[in-house]
Each structure stands twice: as structure tokens, then as C-alpha cells.
Image (cartoon, rainbow, N blue to C red):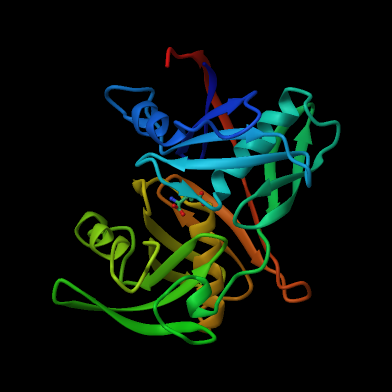
């Protein structure tokens, strides 16, 4: 199988093009190929598939074999992939995902090189049971959650996939490995959850570290950055546009008041192409 290794701010993926539909063994392939010792090594396995509704469809498997509804860093990589290979003829493309339908993507190209990718990530979902969180409320803001004897206050947002945003004194030094795994599988989240630990530095800058559902500690999370911005606006902590600084780098996120859509802008890189026996 031919693949292209790509990343968005160090959140890395094995990108596969050419399948007509998601292979039945995609979960097993994801586990094997994402393994950083016995496989290629990545946070996820991403398939670029035909789409009736857009230019292409993206399906994303986490490294634990679970399928995610949406992935911000991966959609930027997929968009760069299809543009670089001439599989689309415009810098404006539409990528379909399970979690957010047809997503408009704008590539900023300079001398034929994709510099940044801006993705319309759609409208945030705030209603508890749709996120899902086991709380029947119109929104889940600044609620308490307890894990292993420690109480946190959290805000839940879905960007097509579920997120739990927790504000801490210093996200950069917070013990992610101690608390991320406990909260990822907390019974409040029927489909588990991506956990973001955030520290607001100003009304236009947030530091965030993420423990991802089905992938663990990643260097960046695009949907997590979107959820963090939405949560910060809802809690009155930032303006509607801010830089979200992750371990792997920065994303510019805006929650547009006029259309209620969240826009994410960031890079996408190719590391290498290869062939793997499966
Ligand atoms: N682990 C996530 C999917 C990848 C999301 C993240 N890598 C991003 O860039 O949005 C989940 O199960 O919802």
C-alpha cells in the first residue's frame, strides 16, 4: 500500500489515497501502522475517498483503531495532498467528513506551494446530549467533573467530535498524562472525549495541551483548538478570534459571529511518501 506521511503542527498521519471505500480492516490497519515501534508510527490513519457531496471524503482512524467523526489537522493535510497532486483544480475545495458534512477549505498558495490552509469547521454543537455528554442541557458550561478524587470545572463542545475543555493554572506544565486518560473515559462521556487543558494568556491568546480520544497525548489538535476557542468565548475569557498555542505550534481560530461557523487556519506538511506491505 502506498502512503504519504503528513502532519499538522506535529499531529501526524498516514494518508492513503485510491480506495473507493473504507477498507473493512481499517481499524486493524490503523493499530498496526500507527504503532511507533512496529509500524510506520502516527496519531492516525487517514483515507481520502470519493465523495458525492464534495471534492473528496476524509475518513480518519485513531491510532487505537477507533474512527473519529472529524479531525482538524488531518483535513488540512488532505486538502494539501489533493491540491499538490492536481486532484483538484482550485484553491477552494470541499472536503466531506462524517462529523461536519461538506467543509469548505481555502488554500493559501504562494509560487505553487501551499503556505496555510483555512478550514470552515462548521458550527459548534453545545447541547449536552448531542456532544454527547450525559447532561441534558442546552449547553455544558463551567460544570464540575470528578476523577480519582480531584474535581475539575469543564466546558463541553462538539466540533463533530466531543471535547472537554478544562482551564488550569499553566497548561504547559500541567500533568497531562496523569489526568488525560482518566477524563478521556469518564462515564459522563458516552463516546469518550478529547480532553483539552487550557490557560488563557490574553483575550487573543490561549496555551492548550491535549489528551486525544483514541490517540493520547498529541502535539496538536485542530478540533480541540476550535473547541477551546468556543469555550473561552462562552466563558467570557477571550475575543472571538485568538491564537491557540499547542505543543507543536500555533493555530489561528475564529468563531464568526455572523454565520456561527468556526474557522481554523494553520499549516500542513509532507514528511515522506512510502510503500508498506499489509
Ligand atoms: N482523536 C480525535 C480525532 C482527531 C482529532 C485531532 N487530531 C484534530 O486535529 O482535530 C477524536 O477521536 O475525536
Compare residues 222 and 160 and report the one nearer the observer.
Answer: 160
Q: Residue at x 45, y 14 (%)?
A: 276
Compare residues 177 and 94 and report the one nearer the observer.
Answer: 94
Residue 16 in the image, given as x and y percentages of width and height: 57, 26
Q: Residue at x 44, y 71 (%)?
A: 200
Q: Quadrant of residue 201?
A: bottom left
Residue 46 shown left or right of residue 84 in the figure: left
Q: Residue at x 37, y 73 (%)?
A: 167
In the image, residue 56 sits, relative to residue 153, either above or below, namely above
Residue 159 shown left or right of residue 95 in the figure: left
Residue 194 in the image, given as x and y percentages of width and height: 40, 59
On the question of residue 120 being in view, the answer is no
Residue 103 in the image, given as x and y percentages of width and height: 72, 52
Residue 3 shown left or right of residue 40 in the figure: right
**Residue with the most extreme left position:** 149
In the image, residue 155 sits, relative to residue 278, either above or below, namely below
**Residue with the most extreme front position:** 24
**Residue with the most extreme right position:** 89
In the image, residue 41 sits, relative to residue 228, either above or below, namely above
Q: Residue at x 37, y 84 (%)?
A: 143
On the question of residue 124 being in view, the answer is yes
Q: Quadrant of the C terminus?
A: top left
Q: Quadrant of residue 65?
A: top left
Residue 97 in the image, given as x and y percentages of width and height: 64, 49
Amino acid at each position: 500500500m502506498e502512503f504519504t506521511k503528513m502532519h499538522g503542527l506535529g499531529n501526524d498521519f498516514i494518508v492513503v489515497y485510491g480506495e473507493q471505500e473504507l477498507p473493512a480492516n481499517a481499524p486493524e490497519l490503523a493499530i498496526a501502522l500507527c504503532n511507533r515501534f512496529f509500524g510506520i508510527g502516527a496519531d492516525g490513519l487517514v483515507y481520502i475517498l470519493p465523495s458525492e457531496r464534495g471534492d473528496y471524503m476524509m475518513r480518519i482512524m485513531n491510532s487505537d483503531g477507533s474512527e473519529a467523526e472529524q479531525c482538524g489537522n488531518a483535513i488540512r493535510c488532505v486538502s494539501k495532498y489533493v491540491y499538490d497532486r492536481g486532484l483538484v483544480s482550485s484553491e477552494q475545495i470541499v472536503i466531506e467528513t462524517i462529523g461536519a458534512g461538506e467543509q469548505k477549505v481555502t488554500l493559501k498558495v504562494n509560487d505553487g506551494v501551499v503556505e496555510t490552509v483555512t478550514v470552515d469547521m462548521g458550527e459548534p454543537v453545545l447541547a449536552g446530549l448531542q456532544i454527547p455528554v450525559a447532561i441534558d442541557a442546552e449547553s455544558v458550561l463551567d460544570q464540575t467533573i470528578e476523577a480519582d478524587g480531584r474535581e475539575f470545572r469543564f466546558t463541553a463542545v462538539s466540533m463533530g467530535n466531543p471535547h472537554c475543555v478544562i482551564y488550569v493554572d499553566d497548561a504547559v506544565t500541567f500533568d497531562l498524562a496523569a489526568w488525560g486518560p482518566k477524563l478521556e473515559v469518564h462515564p459522563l462521556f458516552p463516546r469518550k472525549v478529547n480532553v483539552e487543558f487550557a490557560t488563557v494568556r490574553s483575550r487573543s491568546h490561549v496555551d492548550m495541551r491535549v489528551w486525544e480520544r483514541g490517540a493520547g497525548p498529541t502535539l496538536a489538535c485542530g478540533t480541540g483548538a476550535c473547541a477551546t476557542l468556543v469555550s473561552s468565548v462562552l466563558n467570557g475569557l477571550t475575543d472571538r478570534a485568538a491564537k491557540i498555542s499547542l505543543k507543536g505550534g500555533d493555530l489561528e481560530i475564529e468563531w464568526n459571529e455572523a454565520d456561527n461557523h468556526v474557522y481554523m487556519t494553520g499549516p500542513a506538511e509532507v514528511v515522506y511518501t512510502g510503500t508498506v506491505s499489509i
